Image (cartoon, rainbow, N blue to C red):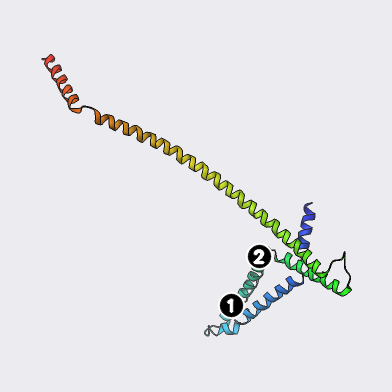
Amino acid sequence: MKRVEESQEMLTNLEGSRVKLLKIAVNTALAKVLSSCSMDKLSTCFTNLNSTQYEYLDKIFKQLQIFMQQSVEEELEKILKENQAIERLNALDKLIEESKQYATTRRRTHSETPEDLVNKRLYYIKKSYHKKLVEKVEQLQEKHEKIVSTLTVKRNELQSRRSVILEKLSFLNEATNFANELPIDEISEAILQGEMLIANQRL
């Protein structure tokens, strides 16, 4: 099963004519950019180089060109993969080819006009895109539910801590009120009289 899926993926990612033309256009544009900065132009910025230094600079310049070429190719492949451009361009190639075949042979397959073929192909493309959108929405919904669950737990913890703090504050307030209601002067006088009585008994 895995091999069948890999084979289907390889067929899907085969480069059609439009993918090849796209890469040719990118490489042509890159070649123009690189040619605008030649080694001859670069060497005019370093007029005091000897032959060894010039060869070394030329080597670095060629390595830079190779690096830029590889970087652009890798970035292009990344963009094509992320946007499924190869699959879509191949689908467009197939759609145009089917329309050309119909126009050439002037035959209708199951009473399908060129417009029917275009609409049919677009339907499957939209259906595939809709499926991926639904999967993305489900992933986002799952993340949202996890976030809500975490926030609910945190809120319950805060409410529990708040209840404990309020309980302690209430107890402290009651203790303060009780202390304020005590007859301090009478208690102090009673303590003093008790101490004097004890002192007299000792004498």
Q: CA distance from mark 1 to mark 2?
A: 33 Å
Res 20 quadrant in image: bottom right
Neighbourhood count class around disc 1 (C-alpha, 10 Å): few under 14, some 14–19, many 20 upward: few
Count every numbered label the image shows and give the total: 2
Residue with the mark numbered 2: 78
The secondary structure type at the circle numbered 2 is helix
- Which three-letter amino acid code belongs to the residue tagged 1? Tyr
Neighbourhood count class around disc 2 (C-alpha, 10 Å): few under 14, some 14–19, many 20 upward: few
From where the camera sits, is residue 33 visible?
Answer: yes
Please name the residue shown 20% across and 28% down the image: 184
163 left or right of 9 in image:
left
Earlier sequence position, callout 1 versus callout 2? 1
- Which three-letter amino acid code belongs to the residue tagged 2? Lys
**In this orientation, which residue lies closer to the viewer: 71 or 115?**
115
- Residue 121, relative to residue 38: is it above or below? above
**In this orientation, which residue lies closer to the viewer: 143 or 3?**
143
The image shows residue 91 at horizontal and vertical percentages of 76, 66
Please name the residue shown 28% across and 32% down the image: 177
The image shows residue 37 at horizontal and vertical percentages of 59, 81
Residue with the mark numbered 1: 56
86 left or right of 51 in image:
right
Q: Nearer the viewer, mark 1 or mark 2?
A: 2
**In this orientation, which residue lies closer to the viewer: 72 or 50?**
72
Where is the C terminus found, in terms of image quarters? Answer: top left
- Residue 23, relative to residue 49: is it above or below? above
